Image: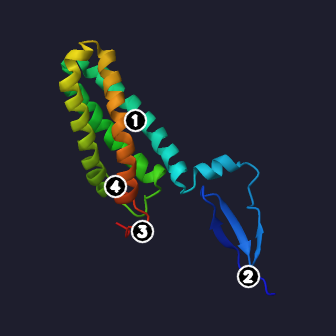
Amino acid sequence: MTETAALPLRDALGVRAYARGFEARKPTIRRAESIPAAWLRSDAVVAQLVRFAATGGTTALLQFGVFFLLFGAGEQVANLAGVVLSSMLANEMHRRLTFRAGARVSWLTAQWEGGGLSAAALAASSLALALLGDVVGDDWRSGVLLIAAVNAVVGLTRFVLLRVWVFAGDRAPA
């Protein structure tokens, strides 16, 4: 039997394996790289979801910080500023890190389409603040917790839409 080139294969979790002909062998792992680190950089859905959550956590800190700093100007103003700034950062982090679409999707496209999804998140959090503002009271911590709860619900929907629409793998280069 003649030697064939190594063909990359992926298992259900997106971990690479290699096959030569009918014989499979373990993937080669560099000394400084562990299997979890390699998996986390893969295109597996769960790995993307982990990166999405890490990006969300990072940008939520920015949103909460802006909300806290601008709370005196009014909760709607503080919310708008926090959502806009954190959304711009999140769209770029998702483009480059979460979905590794930097070569496929331009910065402007990511901001425009991802920004549209962020507008839906802004509408949801603003509506929640307007409807539940009297329930949670004037305490800034209650407002932040309310925004966090709304963002958790909106976040999963946003992940799915970003994955299948904005940063789809079969998208033509921008």
Earlier-in-chain disc, 1 versus 3: 1
Answer yes or no: do the residues labelled 4 and 3 have beta carbons within 8 Å?
no
Determine crowd level at label 3: few under 14, some 14-19, many 20+ residues with C-alpha closer than 10 A: few
Say what amino acid the circle numbered 2 marks. Answer: Thr
| Rendered-image quadrant of the N terminus | bottom right
Earlier-in-chain disc, 4 versus 1: 1
For disc 1, the marked residue is: 59
Q: In this view, does 41 lie above or below 71?
A: below
Residue 94's mark? none
Disc 1 secondary structure class:
helix
Give coordinates of residue 49: x percent, y percent: 49, 46
Q: Is residue 146 shown left or right of residue 5?
A: left
Determine crowd level at label 1: few under 14, some 14-19, many 20+ residues with C-alpha closer than 10 A: many
For disc 3, the marked residue is: 170
Say what amino acid the circle numbered 4 marks. Answer: Trp
Q: Is residue 73 shown left or right of residue 22?
A: left
Disc 4 secondary structure class:
helix
Closer to the eye: label 4 or 1: 1
Residue 106 in view, yes or no = no
Q: Residue at x 55, y 49 (%)?
A: 47
For disc 4, the marked residue is: 107
Inter-mark Cα distance, 4 to 1: 17 Å
Say what amino acid the circle numbered 3 marks. Answer: Asp
- For this rendering, which residue is in front, 48 or 153? 153
